[in-house]
Structure formats: C-alpha cells, structure tokens
Amino acid sequence: MAERSFRLGDFKLASGARSDYYIDCRTSTMHAHGQVLLGSVGFAAIREAGLRPDAVGGLTMGADPLAYAIAAASWREGDPIHAFSVRKRAKRHGKGQLIEGCFEPGARVVIVEDVITTGGSAFKACEAVNQANGDVLGILGLVDREEGGRAALERAGLHTIVLYTASDLRAAVAAAGPAPA
C-alpha cells in the first residue's frame, strides 16, 4: 500500500490545502494483487467488527475498486456481500438513479472510502443511502489522513473502521528507505 500509493513532495489537495504528502489509493486498489489483498483485509475487518451488511459501496470513483474487491473476497469466503456505487449526481436518463449496482431499499450497508480526510465523501454516500431507505451500519476507510474526518464520522454516530493511517504509510515508506536510482 505504502509503496504504490504514498508519495512525499509538495501537493495541492482537492480542498485547496497544501500537503507534504499525497495518497492515491487507486494505484493499490486497481492493481490486481492489491485488489486481492485489500479485498481480503477489508472483508475481514468488516466481519471482525461484527458487521453483517448486505452490500458495500461508496462515492464513485475512490470507493468503487475497494467495494468490488471486498465483494469478490466475500464470495471466495462463501459469505457474499454485494457491491454498489453512489454517483456524484443522479443520471439524467434511464431510471435517473443515484445508486447503481446491488442496492435495494432496506439494504444494510457499509460505506467504503479510499481516503478519509474530512469525511465529506462518506457523508455524501450515507446521505444517498439514507434517502434511498438503506441502513448504514458503518464506514470502512482504507486510509485515514488523520485530519479530523474519522472523528467527524464518529461524532455523527457512524461506526468507523480504518485499515491504515497516513502515519502508518509514512512510517512504512521511511522504513523501506530511499528508492533505488
């Protein structure tokens, strides 16, 4: 995760803030080996937390590969959890859906998020699920940037599981030493 997704430097974040590091989970969650590993770890974390969702998903595009990886891992374990995606805005054609995939009213879900910074994407996904009469059991974040997002989600009463923190990734990069030239 750290090797593929964590970079040191000078970066402008989506919020407009500057950071001395950048986390791009897609380089891990869209990697074939990363999908297998993160799907298994994510599925195990959901079960270890005692959650029994019907489906996992979140705001597209960051949540998508993690949700799909967890769904695949759950199938391999014989304990299926299906996946869904929340669009940033409803389609303007067809059924005009905001939520795509394996979601039905009444579904119990875990919202997944690649990087939790403020919690904004997870809150948007929760709002969409709630409006569609779903039941949010909790949040699973791949990485917590440790900038208050996890605390905001928890203050809102959302059970939040985090697999890695930015500090974990920074420490792993430091322990690995400089990249070969």
Image: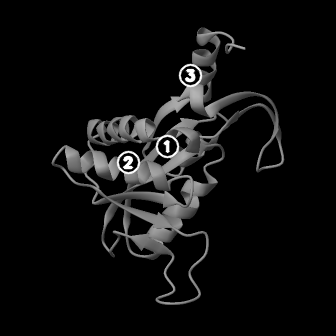
Quadrant in which the C terminus appears: top right
Residue 158, visible in the rendered structure: no
Q: CA distance from mark 2 to mark 3?
A: 22 Å
Residue 1, visible in the rendered structure: yes
Question: Decide: marks 2, 3 in contact (CB < 8 A)?
Answer: no
Report the mark closest to the observer, 2 or 3: 2
**Callout 3: 10 Å neighbours few (<14), some, many (20+)?**
some
Compare marks 2 and 3 and give the one earlier in the sequence: 2
Residue type indicated by callout 2: Ala
Residue under the point 51% across and 86% down: 96
Q: Secondary structure at mark 3?
A: helix
Disc 2 marks which residue? Answer: 69
Residue type indicated by callout 3: Asp
Residue under the point 49% across and 81% down: 97
154 displayed left or right of 174: left
Residue 173 on image: x %, y %: 62, 18
Q: CA distance from mark 3 to mark 1?
A: 17 Å
Whether residue 40 is situated above or below residue 167 in the rendered picture: below
Rendering quarter of residue 11: top right
Residue type indicated by callout 1: Thr
Residue 63 on image: x %, y %: 51, 53
Compare marks 3 and 1 and give the one earlier in the sequence: 1
Which of the labelled discs sits on residue 19, or is there none? none
Residue under the point 27% across and 60% down: 54
Q: Secondary structure at mark 2?
A: helix
Furthest toward the front, the residue is: 181
Question: Decide: marks 2, 1 in contact (CB < 8 A)?
Answer: yes
8 displayed left or right of 134: right
**Callout 1: 10 Å neighbours few (<14), some, many (20+)?**
many
Could you say which is closer to the camera, residue 8 or residue 159?
A: 8
Disc 3 marks which residue? Answer: 168
96 displayed left or right of 80: right
